[in-house]
Amino acid sequence: MKTNHPRKFTEAFWRRLTNFWTIIFFIVVIADYVMNNALDHDNVILIVSVLYGASLAIYSAEKEFKRWHDCHETMHPGELYVICWTLLVFGILAANVFIQKNYELPAEVRATYVVVVGVLALTKESKHLYRRQKKCEVK
């Protein structure tokens, strides 16, 4: 027997959680820069990157699942995540050069940047395929 319980973990929930972990991750990366890799050595960045990556993956999957089941109505462009990440990563690299600080951008940060760009590419391609399929169904 099917019951109509409201879903606790909606797309909006995952979007808010992803936004939260994005902000926390940025704060941690900036703090790590200021503290000369201290948080990287204590594995704080690793832990935050895993939590961020998991929330981003779930949010993106939820959004795409809803799109393909014609339930996705909101618009939250993933380009904003990529722009923010690009500003953070290249901002730190530029600051490193100009300040001549001996800071090494942690591997988890570099890997997470690649994941964010990859998720955007996958969701863009999914959106493109969805629109193409819908166009074919109309004809």
Image (cartoon, rainbow, N blue to C red):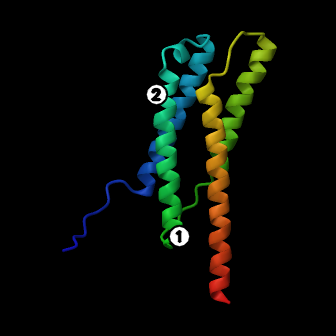
Q: Could you tell whether 130 is left or right of 51 in the image?
A: right
Q: Can you tell which quarter of the image residue 31 is in?
A: top right
Give me the C-alpha separation between circle 2 and circle 1: 32 Å
Whole-percent x and y of residue 27?
Answer: 55, 25
- Reading the image, the residue beneath label 1 is 68
Q: Could you tell whether 129 is left or right of 2 in the image?
A: right
Residue type for callout 1: Trp
Q: Earlier in the sequence, mark 2 or mark 1?
A: 2
Give the camera-side residue of 34 and 43. 43
Q: Can you tell which quarter of the image residue 77 is in?
A: bottom right
Residue type for callout 2: Ile
Binning the other alpha carbons within 10 Å of mark 2 as few (below 14), some (14 to 19) or many (20 upward) gives some
Whole-percent x and y of residue 90?
Answer: 74, 29
Look at 48% across and 66% down and name the residue there.
Answer: 66
Whole-percent x and y of residue 65?
Answer: 49, 64
- Reading the image, the residue beneath label 2 is 47
Q: Could you tell whether 103 is left or right of 11 in the image?
A: right
Look at 22% across and 73% down and name the residue there.
Answer: 2
In the rendered image of this protein, does residue 16 appear above or below residue 25? Answer: below
Whole-percent x and y of residue 70?
Answer: 51, 73
